[in-house]
Image (tube, rainbow, N blue to C red):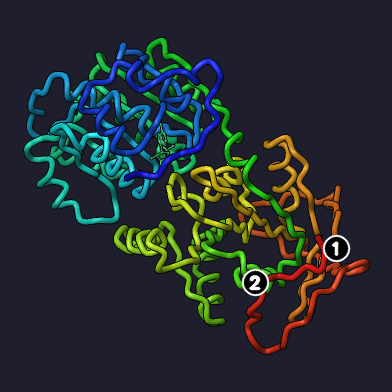
């Protein structure tokens, strides 16, 4: 059974049932098997509009039930008139930014389509193209693809999308951030004019609006409050810390008794590898997922994390996007994201399925401008504490303030000159010291409430 989602159903849709949305019996049966009681707001609005044939612009992030919102109507159409797809062709195309998200969407298709006949191909990079070519030879109902590999196959004449009448661009803002926009525009140009197009995005920057207006026809706009679910259930902590102390602080947090399963975010692949190395040296078991890992490695790591064999996952934003794993007790921002929206995506990895979670952000002086952007985005001033590691001891100074003059780092690289080590510890509160030289096996005891 798939995990269930706790969302705040909007008032006007609270009485909507899946039976009211126009879905066929095979899908209703699958929904029941999945254990879903009622549609989420995005499902309640999107499903009937899609069945009517409308284009949709959906402003929603992962965790809102957006996948079922577009997958169910696509399956409905396939189930209603089952015509075999033409060779190398597909009836519906779903584009996603990452391989993991594509695999996850394909899993959802198989789950929701379990009582009907539907064929799916996952067309992503990082794996051998041959099996994908073989899978496409007879044609499939639905392709779930990342844009790069899809374009390669189209160029080699092994995939055709000129008969594809339903198209979904999932996490369009993320695809744009990854530089897929030119590829998406080229691909959209190869689709038939008579089609239904769905665009989903957590944010709506100008380029995404332009994409929607260029390729969608009078779309219905569905907006789901992006932060309401995670932010309410997540305890957000900001630790202002010297950059040189971040690693030791991270280890202390990971040693905490309330730590069950953590995702640690870094900004770069190199940074992710470095954190794994440092943690492993200290006896932790950790693994990283990022763009330089092969698809098989990434999937293996995710499976181990999901199964509970690995409880510390180090990830870059891209690799973790859209990953749906429950029971993540902690999200730790080892490095703050330089794009504020990523903060919301990152911390949304915890507090899933109605559970509460803890998000801890380690912010050094070079990252204070990023933190200000985040606070602006979420319209919330976050409580900050200055934390320093003295020997094996953590010293907390509550109610710390950001430096009002902290400037944004000039580029993706940090400016070492700005890396102040003021180390003001005045007013700090001392914890019970642990023995030095050993990994501290204790909760960060903070000596206060
Ligand atoms: P998504 O936003 O598509 O990533 O979905 C997030 C999670 O919500 C997934 O684990 C889905 O299985 C679950 N989910 C989707 N629709 C419902 C629903 N109507 N009721 C309960 N859980 C749902």
Residue 397 bears which disc, if any?
A: 1
Is the residue 136 above or below the residue 288 in the image? above
Number of marks in picture = 2
Marks 1 and 2 close (CB-CB < 8 Å): no
Nearest to the eye among marks 1 and 2: give it: 1
Foreground pick, 383 / 274? 383
How far from the left and from the top, in percent, is residue 374?
A: 69, 42
**Which image quarter holds the C terminus?**
bottom right
Is the residue 370 above or below the residue 186 in the image? below
Question: Which badge, 1 or 2, comes first in the chain's sequence?
Answer: 2
How far from the left and from the top, in percent, is residue 259?
A: 58, 65
Query: Does any portion of residue 181 appear in the rendered image?
Result: no
Disc 2 element = helix
How far from the left and from the top, in percent, is residue 30?
A: 26, 34
How far from the left and from the top, in percent, is residue 18?
A: 35, 22
Quarter, ligand 1: top left
For the point 77% across and 77% down, which residue is it? 393
Which residue was labeled with disc 2? 247
Foreground pick, 236 / 197? 236
Residue density around tag 1, few if under 14, some if 14–19, many if 20 or more, within 10 Å: many
Q: Residue furthest right?
A: 426
**Which image quarter holds the N terminus?**
top left
Query: Does any portion of residue 22 appear in the rendered image?
Result: yes
For the point 55% across and 61% down, which residue is it? 264
């Amino acid at each position: 059974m798939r995990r269930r989602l706790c969302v705040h159903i909007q008032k006007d849709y609270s009485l909507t049932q899946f039976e009211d949305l126009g879905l066929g019996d095979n899908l209703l049966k699958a929904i029941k098997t999945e254990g879903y009681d009622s549609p989420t707001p995005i499902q309640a609005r999107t499903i009937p509009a899609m069945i009517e044939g409308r284009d949709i612009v959906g402003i929603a992030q992962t965790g809102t039930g957006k996948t079922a919102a577009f997958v169910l109507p696509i399956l409905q159409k396939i189930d209603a008139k089952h015509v075999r797809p033409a060779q190398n062709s597909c009836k519906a195309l779903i584009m996603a930014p990452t391989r993991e998200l594509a695999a996850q969407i394909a899993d959802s298709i198989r789950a929701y389509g379990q009582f009907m006949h539907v064929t799916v191909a996952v067309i992503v990079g990082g794996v051998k193209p041959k099996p994908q070519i073989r899978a496409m030879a007879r044609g499939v109902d639905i392709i779930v693809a990342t844009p790069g590999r899809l374009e390669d196959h189209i160029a080699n004449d092994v995939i055709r999308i000129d008969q594809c009448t339903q198209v979904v661009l999932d996490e369009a803002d993320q695809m744009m951030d990854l530089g897929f926009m030119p590829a998406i525009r080229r691909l959209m140009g190869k689709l038939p004019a008579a089609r239904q197009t769905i665009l989903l995005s957590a944010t709506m920057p100008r380029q995404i609006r332009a994409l929607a207006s260029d390729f969608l026809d009078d779309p219905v706009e569905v907006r789901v409050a992006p932060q309401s679910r995670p932010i309410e259930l997540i305890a957000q902590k900001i630790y202002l810390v010297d950059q040189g102390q971040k690693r030791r602080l991270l280890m202390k947090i990971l040693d905490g008794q309330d730590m069950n399963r953590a995702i640690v975010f870094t900004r770069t692949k190199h940074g992710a590898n470095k954190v794994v190395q440092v943690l492993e040296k200290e006896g932790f078991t950790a693994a990283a997922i990022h763009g330089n890992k092969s698809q098989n490695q990434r999937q293996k790591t995710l499976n181990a994390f999901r199964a509970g064999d690995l409880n510390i996952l180090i990830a870059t934003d891209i690799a973790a996007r859209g990953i749906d794993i429950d029971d993540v007790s902690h999200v730790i921002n080892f490095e703050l994201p330089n794009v504020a929206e990523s903060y919301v995506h990152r911390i949304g990895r915890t507090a899933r399925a109605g559970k509460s979670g803890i998000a801890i952000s380690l912010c050094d002086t070079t990252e204070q401008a990023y933190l200000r952007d985040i606070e602006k985005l979420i319209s919330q001033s976050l409580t900050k504490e200055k934390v320093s590691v003295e020997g094996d001891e953590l010293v907390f100074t509550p109610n710390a303030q950001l430096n009002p003059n902290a400037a944004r780092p000039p580029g993706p690289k940090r400016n070492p000159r700005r890396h102040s080590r003021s180390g003001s510890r005045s007013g700090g509160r001392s914890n019970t010291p642990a023995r030095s030289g050993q990994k501290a096996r204790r909760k960060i005891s903070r000596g206060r409430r």
